[in-house]
Image (spheres, rainbow, N blue to C red):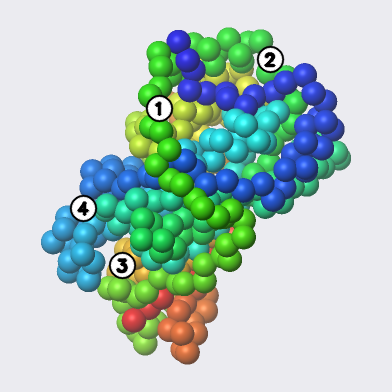
Amino acid sequence: MKSTFGAGGSDDRTPDEIAAHTASVVGYHYTVDDYYEIGREEIRKHAQAVQDAHPTHWSEAGAKEFGHDTLVAHPTFVSVMGMIAQRKLFEEVVTGYDLWQIMQTDQRLVYHQPMKQGDQLICDVSLESFRHITSPEVIDMMVTKNVIWNQHDEPIMTTWTSIVARPGLKVPQELEDSMEHVMMKVDSVGDPGITVVKENDPSGRPDPIARSGAYGAIDFDALEVGQELPPKQFLVTRGNLTNYAGVAGDPNPIHFSDHVISAAEGLDDVVAHGMQTMGLGATYVSEFIGDPAAFGEYSVRFTSPVYVPADHSAAIDFTGKVKSLDPETRRGTIALTAKQGDRKIFGRATVVVQFN
C-alpha cells in the first residue's frame, strides 16, 4: 500500500548539505506534464468549502447575469491544483524536507483572467529564491512561482508562495508511527501520461502582464478611501477542515488528526489550511465588490494558525477597509483583517480590485 503523505521527506544529509542542494536548484523550471481541466462540480465543491454562495460559482444563469459565459471559479480555486503542480518540485528537486514541516508564510495571487469551467490549465513551476538561516534556529526560506495558462495559451494567473521548512529534521518515532496509522493509503495510482508538450523552455518566457477586468463589480464612484466593509464571522469545524482537505487534495494530518498533533511540537490543536482561511477572506471581499472575477491581486501574510477544537466551532472574524483608490485605472485596494478571538491570523492582507 502506498501512503499519499511524506514524499520527499528527510534523509541522511546534514541541514547544511540539504541547504546547499536547494540553493543550487534556484531557477529550476518545469512544465507540469498533464493539464488540469476545471469541472463544473469542482467549482461548486470548492465554493462550498470556502463558504461562498456567489451565483457565478453555482449556476450558468447566475454567471450570465454577471457577464460570464460559464461558471467562474472562486478566486482561490488555484489551491485545488497547487498540490498537483508542485508535487514534482518537492518529490524530485527540492528534497530533504518532510512535507508536514513545510509552512506557508506568504501567498500572492495575480489574476490575468478568471478561471472558468472547461479551462484546461497548464502550469509552469519554478523555484524563485532560497535563503538558509542558522540562528536562532535552522530554517530554510524559499519562494516558488507558478505561471498558469489555459489551452488557448492565454495567461490565467501568476502565483508566488513563500514557505519555511526545517531541513533534515528527524521525525520522532512516535510521530512517524502516528502518521502511519492516520494517513490515507492507496494500492496504486494511475498514470495520466503526458498531455502537455512544451517546445520551448518556460524559463525564457516573459511573465504575463495582463490584468483581469471589472466584469460585474460595483461602481468605482460609489467608493471612498477609508470606507469600511461590513464585518463578517465564519465558523469552521473539524467537518469543514476534513471537507477542505478532500477538495484541495491536501493529506497533511495536522489538519485533522489529534493523534498526530499530540505527538508533534509547536501546535496547540489541529489547524485550518492557510488557503482555506485565505479562501474565506476572498469570499468576504467578493460579497462586497459584487463579482469575484474582478479580483486583480490578492496577497496574504500568514502570522498565526486557526486552531479548530474537536468539541466546538472556531470563529474567524473578518473586517476590511478601502485602503486606496486610483481614479485613472478605477482600481482600488482593500485591506483585510482576520482574527480568531484576539489573535490576528493575517499579518498583512490586501486585495486589488478592478471596479467599474
Check residue 58 in the rendering and tell me which mark sits there, or answer none.
4
Q: Is residue 288 left or right of residue 274?
A: left
Quadrant of the frame with the N terminus:
top left
Q: Position of residue 72 (x, y in %)?
A: 28, 58
Q: Earlier in the sequence, mark 3 or mark 4?
A: 4
Residue at the image point whose x is 23% and y is 47% from the top: 40
Residues marked 1 and 4 touching at CB (< 8 Å): no
Q: Earlier in the sequence, mark 1 or mark 3?
A: 1
Q: Identify the secondary structure beneath mark 3.
A: loop
Q: Nearer the viewer, mark 1 or mark 4?
A: 1
> Tag 2, which secondary structure?
loop
225 and 115: which one is in front?
Answer: 115
Q: Residue furthest bottom?
A: 328
Residue carrying label 1 = 191
| Residue on which the image places disc 3 | 291
Q: Position of residue 2 (x, y in %)?
A: 47, 15
